[in-house]
């Protein structure tokens, strides 16, 4: 059973000498646009730590997705697998990113050259305090 399933998957995804089929190409382009939308939305969600489940992601488990993959002559399991591999790659890209840049270990007010310790008489409020 597993052997026949794997042969069926490869048969649907790899064909060396394919004929031009405008309907198949149309449905593949529909699938490409849907995947691009999903990846764009998931990247912005991952970047801003938004854990919502998107509508595009829910579509991957709907019967329409299966139908479009059938029209595009692609195996839906492989398409899902490749898309989620791309999402994992995006997650690794933003894994250790923070919004703020890292500061160096040297603070300005501790520096001897740029900003020295303020002199008691050199403050702007010195004249007001008298």
Image (cartoon, rainbow, N blue to C red):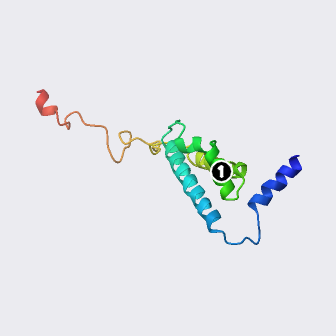
Residue at 65% in and 50% down? 67
Q: Is residue 100 left or right of residue 89?
A: left
Image quarter hosting the C terminus: top left
Furthest residue toward top: 130
Q: Is residue 55 visible?
A: yes
Front residue (pair 33, 63): 63
Residue that label 1 marks: 67
How far across and how far down the image is residue 34, in percent? Answer: 56, 53
Mark 1 crowdedness (10 Å alpha carbons): few <14, some 14-19, many ≥20: few
Front residue (pair 35, 99): 35
Q: Is residue 129 left or right of residue 1?
A: left
Residue at 51% in and 42% down? 45
How far across and how far down the image is residue 78, in percent? Answer: 72, 51
Please give the count of numbered marks on the rendered protein. 1
Front residue (pair 44, 64): 64
How far across and how far down the image is residue 2, in percent? Answer: 87, 47
How far across and how far down the image is residue 66, in percent? Answer: 66, 48
Front residue (pair 75, 53): 75
Callout 1: helix, strand or loop? helix
* Image quadrant in which you'd find residue 122: top left
Residue at 31% in and 42% down? 116
Q: Is residue 129 above or below residue 112?
A: above
Q: Is residue 85 visible?
A: no
* Image quadrant in which you'd find residue 118: top left
């Amino acid at each position: 059973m597993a052997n026949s399933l794997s042969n069926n998957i490869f048969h649907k995804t790899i064909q060396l000498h394919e004929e031009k089929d405008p309907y198949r190409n149309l449905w593949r382009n529909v699938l490409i646009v849907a995947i691009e939308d999903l990846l764009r939305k998931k990247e912005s969600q991952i970047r801003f730590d938004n854990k919502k489940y998107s509508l595009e992601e829910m579509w991957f488990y709907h019967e329409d997705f299966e139908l479009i993959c059938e029209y595009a002559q692609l195996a839906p399991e492989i398409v899902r697998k490749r898309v989620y591999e791309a999402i994992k790659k995006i997650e690794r890209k933003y894994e250790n990113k923070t919004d703020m840049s890292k500061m160096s270990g040297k603070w300005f007010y501790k520096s001897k050259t740029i900003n020295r310790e303020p002199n008691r008489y050199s403050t702007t409020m010195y004249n007001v305090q008298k």
